[in-house]
Image (cartoon, rainbow, N blue to C red):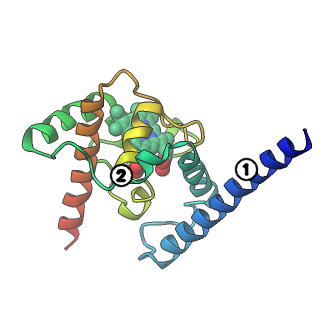
Amino acid sequence: MKQASIAVTLKVTTRLILLGILLASATSVLASGSGHHHHDGETSAHMQSMLAVKNDIPDEYRIMERTPLYPSETSLQQGRELYMQNCSGCHGDEGNGKGPSASSLKIPPANFLDKKHSAIYGPGEKFWIIGNGTDETGMPAFSHLTPSERWHLVNFILHFQEEAEMAEK
Ligand code: HEC
């Protein structure tokens, strides 16, 4: 009995430490950023919830560095259609997080054009979040979308970000 509870305590402690490390690194990423993207209200509460989401995501998605579906014209086109049907209401037509339903949410929908914010989740994590939703930040689950449809969406979101970056230069 005693050993079991020590094991549990250890597990919880490890998780907390991991979360702490993640938080510290994310905070420094934000702090070192250009600043103008983040009004001071980009609260640590929002950030903490985002990092808590990471704890739910299985390792195999966390370590993925790219999508397994090539972002061809067809993939991006399908991603765009799915996005306009399912996502733009919250994340906005332009991906800026300012869709018509955004204001009713406790945590604002992610602004995909804010690359620093969005980079907290890699491609595999985005895929997982779309399929499973998040309790911590209130992103709904789209479990009815097929894996390919979800990868089209991730391709499309990453494309948004590239386009926005190009426009800035
Ligand atoms: C009801 C509003 C709502 C809808 C509809 C919605 N989202 Fe979200 N989404 C959120 C909220 C709230 C968050 C959490 C905020 C954050 O992570 O900064 C979020 C976060 C995310 C994230 C993680 C943040 C990031 O930048 O990687 C991804 C990816 C995402 N949404 C993709 C989608 C896709 C794709 C769809 C459509 C299939 C969709 N969302 C539909 C509200 C919504």
For marks 1 and 2, the one nearer the N-term is 1
Q: Position of residue 162 (x, y in %)?
A: 22, 60
- Residue under the point 34% across and 50% down: 123
In the image, is residue 128 above or below residue 25?
A: above
- Circle 2 is placed at which residue position? 64
Q: Is residue 102 visible to the viewer in this orientation of the structure?
A: no
In the depicted view, which residue is nearer to us: 88 or 117? Answer: 117
Q: Residues within 10 Å of mark 2 (few under 14, many from 20)?
A: few
As helix, strand or loop, the secondary structure at mark 1 comes to helix
Q: Residues within 10 Å of mark 1 (few under 14, many from 20)?
A: few
Q: Position of residue 51 (x, y in %)?
A: 57, 54
Q: Quick one: quadrant of the N terminus? A: top right
As helix, strand or loop, the secondary structure at mark 2 comes to loop
Q: Is residue 51 left or right of residue 34?
A: right
What distance separates the C-alpha of mark 1 from that of mark 2?
24 Å
- Circle 1 is placed at which residue position? 11
Q: Is residue 17 left or right of residue 149?
A: right
The amino acid sitting under disc 1 is Lys
Q: Residue furthest top?
A: 144
In the depicted view, which residue is nearer to us: 52 or 6? Answer: 6
Q: Is residue 89 left or right of residue 103?
A: left
- Residue under the point 79% across and 47% down: 7
